[in-house]
Image (spheres, rainbow, N blue to C red):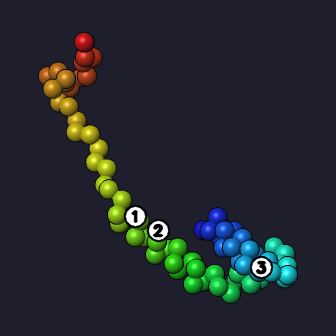
Amino acid sequence: MRKAWINHVAVTRRKGNRGKKTMTHHEAMKVASGTWPKEKAKIMRRMKRECKNRPVVKPPPKNDSIRTDTGNDVAKSD
């Protein structure tokens, strides 16, 4: 979230520096704090949506064919 906050402040500063007006980083942080809760909710929803769509990675199946009767692993020879 820290990186998202800094990006939000940067966007706010760019908007505040349009035309003849100027805005410092400190002023941008003050202005951005008012719009941050709404932006944070949007970011959280986006992250949650991306996690839902991420494919599930299953671990590879264990290969029992290379085990001996005692259960010790045997090195494969090619």
Q: How crowded is mark 1: few (under 14 residues within 10 Å), some or many (20 or more)?
A: few
Q: Residues within 10 Å of mark 3 (few under 14, many from 20)?
A: few
Q: Which residue is drawn at 31% across and 55% down?
A: 56
Q: Residue at x 57, y 77 (%)?
A: 40
Classify residue 60 by image quadrant: top left
Mark 1 residue element? helix
- Residue 46, how many percent across, how many down? 46, 71
Q: Is residue 41 above or below residue 6?
A: below
Q: Residue at x 83, y 78 (%)?
A: 23
Mark 3 or 1 closer to N-term?
A: 3
Q: Find disc 2 in the rendering and name its residue.
A: 47
* Three-letter amino acid code of the residue under disc 2: Met
Q: Is residue 76 left or right of residue 1?
A: left
Q: Is residue 71 above or below residue 4?
A: above
**Does residue 48 appear in this view?**
yes
Q: Do the residues labelled 2 and 1 touch (CB within 8 Å)?
A: yes
- Residue 33, how many percent across, how many down? 70, 83
Query: What's the distance in space between the residues labelled 3 and 1, CA to CA?
Result: 36 Å
Nearest the viewer among 62 and 73 is: 62
Instruction: Give the numbered dot on residue 51.
Output: 1
Q: Residues within 10 Å of mark 2 (few under 14, many from 20)?
A: few
Q: In which quarter of the image is the C terminus?
A: top left
Q: Find disc 3 in the rendering and name its residue.
A: 18
* Three-letter amino acid code of the residue under disc 3: Arg
Mark 3 residue element? loop
Mark 2 residue element? helix
Query: What's the distance in space between the residues labelled 3 and 2, CA to CA?
Result: 30 Å
Q: Do the residues labelled 3 and 1 touch (CB within 8 Å)?
A: no
Q: Is residue 5 left or right of residue 49?
A: right
* Three-letter amino acid code of the residue under disc 1: Cys
